[in-house]
Image: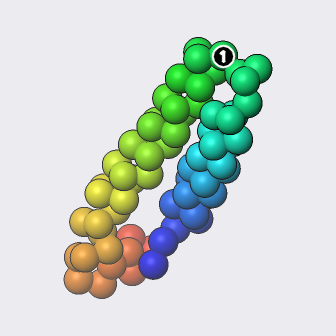
């Protein structure tokens, strides 16, 4: 089970990783541009992991989010 947030952040990570791989082989790309995209990927991975860790509490609790919607 994953939320829309997790799915969208996962898509962004995949897109940025794909972009990084294509940039890595381009001789016109500067080192700072590569470092910038790596930083973006790292930030997105941290956001994904932190959200996932925070939501685990609610997902494991008896009844999940059902009690929050009443």
User: What residue sits 63% from the left and 34% below the top?
Assistant: 24
Query: In the rendered image, which quarter is residue 52 located in?
Result: bottom left
Q: Which colour assignment does the render follow?
A: rainbow
Viewer-closest of 57 and 29: 29
Q: Is residue 8 above or below residue 59?
A: above
Viewer-closest of 69 and 21: 21
Q: Is residue 5 visible?
A: no
Q: What element does badge 1 sit on? A: loop
> In the rendered image, which quarter contains the C terminus?
bottom left
> In the rendered image, which quarter contains the N terminus?
bottom left
Q: Position of residue 56 (x, y in %)?
A: 29, 66
Q: Position of residue 11 (x, y in %)?
A: 63, 57
Q: Is residue 70 above or below residue 45?
A: below
Q: Is residue 22 visible?
A: yes
Viewer-closest of 20 and 2: 20
Label 1 crowd (10 A; few <14 / some 14-19 / many >=20): few
In screen coordinates, is 67 left or right of 22? left
In screen coordinates, is 31 left or right of 58? right
Query: In the rendered image, which quarter is residue 58 located in?
Result: bottom left
In screen coordinates, is 19 left or right of 45? right
In screen coordinates, is 30 left or right of 44? right
Q: Position of residue 67 (x, y in %)?
A: 34, 77
User: What residue sits 68% from the left and 35% below the top?
Assistant: 25
The residue indicated by pointer 1 is 30
């Amino acid at each position: 089970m994953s939320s829309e947030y997790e799915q969208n952040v996962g898509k962004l990570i995949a897109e940025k990783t794909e972009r990084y791989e294509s940039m890595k082989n381009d001789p016109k790309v500067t080192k700072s541009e590569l470092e910038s995209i790596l930083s973006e990927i790292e930030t997105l991975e941290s956001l994904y992991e932190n959200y996932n860790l925070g939501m685990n509490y609610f997902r494991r609790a008896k009844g999940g989010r059902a009690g929050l919607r009443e």
